[in-house]
Structures are given as C-alpha cells and as structure tokens.
Image (spheres, rainbow, N blue to C red):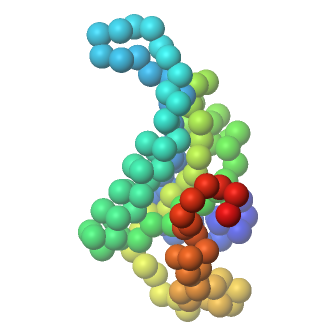
Amino acid sequence: MPFNRSWAQQASALVLIMSRTTFAAPGVTEEKPALWHTFDTGSAWGHLALQASISGWHTHGMAGFDQDLARQELKVPEGYVLHAMVAIGKLGDKASLDEALQAREAPTPRKPLSELAAEGDFSL
C-alpha cells in the first residue's frame, strides 16, 4: 500500500507472514485442518521480532499490503493464509522521513493492564 511503501521500501528485507491451513501428522498422508495455524504463526512472528531486536534489527508488521499481488508474485498456492508483511532493517535517520511520518516516530501510549485482562467470565 502507498503509505507503507513510502518507508518500507528502504527495509533490508520484506517478509511475508503466512500459514498453512492443513497439516499431515508424521507418518500420515491425509491432510487435516490445522485449527491452530494462526496461533502458531502469531507466536512465530513474535519470536522473529524479538530475535531481530536482540540482534540489533528493527521490525515493523504491516497488514496494509496487496495480498492478491503478493500471492501472485510469490506463487503462494491455495491452502495458505497471508497474514502480514514485515519490514526488517536497521533504524534509519528520522530526518529522512517526510514530516507526517516523522511526527509518528514516538512511543505510543499503552493501555493499562486492567483494560486488557479480567478475572471471571466474558460478560464482565
């Protein structure tokens, strides 16, 4: 998407995060639905971001990308879900960004834990 392209084009790598919706257990040829594929993929992306940070790299996940074009260009077969694109690179000079993007280069406020977690059933 144009907004993400304006800065992501400078990344060292663009990584497509996707998951396979079926699996075959070891020793079995029949494919079955992989009901947890999104959970596993989210965990893998989180660990990728953590390892990149430990290694001195920065990551930025983006939902704003052309899924149809990515599927076509990368020849992604049916049975895979495309979740996000991740830009990986070294942090550049903030001054090289246009003014609108420079203004966004600040920590965002976080919600308190009390707004994100609760005890009891879902009706709280």
User: Where's the N terminus, which quadrant?
Assistant: bottom right
Please, which residue is most extreme toward the left here?
55
Decide: is 15 above or below 73.
Answer: below
**Residue at left 35%, top 64%?**
50
**Residue at left 50%, top 17%?**
32
Decide: is 22 above or below 53.
Answer: above
**Left or right placement of residue 117 versus residue 26 in this view:** right
**Residue at left 45%, top 66%?**
59
Decide: is 9 above or below 121.
Answer: below
Q: In which quarter of the image is residue 8?
A: bottom right
**Left or right placement of residue 57 versus residue 117 in this view:** left
Decide: is 98 above or below 10.
Answer: below
Name the spot of residue 111 as percent of width and height, x first.
Answer: 59, 79
Marks counted in the figure total 0
Name the spot of residue 24 as percent of width and height, x first.
Answer: 41, 17
Residue 110 visible to the viewer: yes
Name the spot of residue 23 as percent of width and height, x first.
Answer: 44, 22
Q: Nearer the viewer, residue 92 or 79?
A: 79
Q: Which of 61 and 30 is in front in this view?
A: 30
Q: Nearer the viewer, residue 110 or 57?
A: 110
User: Where's the C terminus, which quadrant?
Assistant: bottom right
Residue 105 visible to the viewer: no
**Residue at left 35%, top 9%?**
28
Name the spot of residue 16 as percent of width and height, x first.
Answer: 52, 47
